[in-house]
Every structure is written in structure tokens, then in C-alpha cells.
Image (cartoon, rainbow, N blue to C red):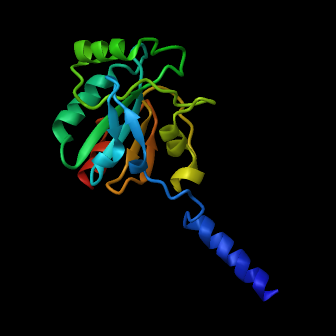
Amino acid sequence: MQKHIVILYVLIFSTMTGMTQTGKTFYDFKVKTLEGDNFDLASLKGKKVMVVNTASKCGFTPQYADLEKLYLKYGGDKFTIIGFPANNFLHQEPGSNKDIRQFCTREYGVTFPMMEKISVKGRDMAPLYQWLTRKSENGVLDSEVKWNFQKYLIDENGKLVKVILSKEKPDSEEIVNWIEGK
């Protein structure tokens, strides 16, 4: 009987502390840029990172301008933004990687890192987004990418901190306070 209580305690404790996770962090992933170059997310160690799934033909597309302003103000040694174009919602990102780069540069002057077009939901979900959306992988929470311009906040240690829904602007008080450490 006592043995069963100890086992139950260990199971409860390990679940509560996230010991059942895979042990992966954000830094364990490698992705590709819009230009097809390899990008090792481990190169961002020590920075806070905002991961955003983007689209060129969405009602939230003007958030590119807010993202760029935020990046110009805070981007550097302590913070960055990474955009991941995705065509998962009403075909609002139909273009090629080259088309996306041209659009982002021409329309919004985007200088923050943009990665190649991926899938952020469904059977073909990119491995990074599997990690972002599954507590069993990230150790923090389960989530679903509900629409374009949903934001995932990653801390300086590569751990998921929070999910911010699309309607909240990138320069919201909550996000700015997180970046500034308030």
C-alpha cells in the first residue's frame, strides 16, 4: 500500500513539474529562411523571442508594421521576432517564399527574420509548431493556432512562456512589459 502511494506521489509530482515533457527547448530546432538558408534557433540563446505565424492577405496583415516597429525598438541582443508565413487559414498566404519576401519588404519594410512558409496546424504541422502547441513537448501548455498573427513568447532559456492571440497587437502593453521584464 505504501509503495502505491509513493508511486502515485511521483506520478503527480512529475506531471506537475513538467518532467513528462521531451526536454526539448526552442533552441533544439533548425528552420529555413525565406531565402532557403538554414537557421539554427540555438543562435538565439539568451534572447526573448516572439514567434508569429504570418499571412499577406489577412485582416491582421497590417500587424507587420507593428511587428517591424517593435523589432526596430527592441530587436538586438535581448529580443527578436521571427515570422513564419503559413497558408492554413482561408488561403491567406498563397505566395511562394520569394513572393512573401517581396511583399514584406515592399509593403512593410520588414527587416526581422522571416522563415520559409510552413504549416502551423494539421497533419503537416511543422515540428517547431508541434513543440509550441503541445504541452507534452513544451512542458508548459497545450494550445491551438487559431488564426494568422498568433504570437508565441519564448524566454531567454528557450522555454515557452505564453501564447498571445491574433487580435492583440504586437506592441500591446502586455507584450512590451514582457520584453522589458516588467
Q: Nearer the viewer, residue 86 or 97?
A: 97
Q: Residue furthest bottom?
A: 2
Q: In the rendering, at what x and y percent does residue 54 appear?
A: 40, 25
- Number of marks drawn: 0
Q: In the rendering, at what x and y percent does residue 181 appear?
A: 26, 55
Question: Looking at the rendering, which quadrant does residue 182 occupy?
Answer: bottom left
| Residue at x-position 47% and y-position 14% | 92
In the image, taking residue 77 as reference, residue 167 lies left or right, namely: right
Q: Nearer the viewer, residue 131 or 5?
A: 131
Question: Looking at the rendering, which quadrant does residue 164 occupy?
Answer: top left
Q: Nearer the viewer, residue 178 or 53?
A: 53
| Residue at x-position 35% and y-position 11% | 99
Q: Residue furthest right?
A: 1
Q: In the rendering, at what x and y percent does residue 105 appear?
A: 24, 17
The N terminus lies in which quarter of the figure?
Answer: bottom right
Q: In the rendering, at what x and y percent does residue 157 appear?
A: 35, 57
In the image, taking residue 39 as reference, residue 111 lies left or right, namely: left
| Residue at x-position 28% and y-position 13% | 102
| Residue at x-position 34% and y-position 42% | 40
Q: Nearer the viewer, residue 5 or 167?
A: 5
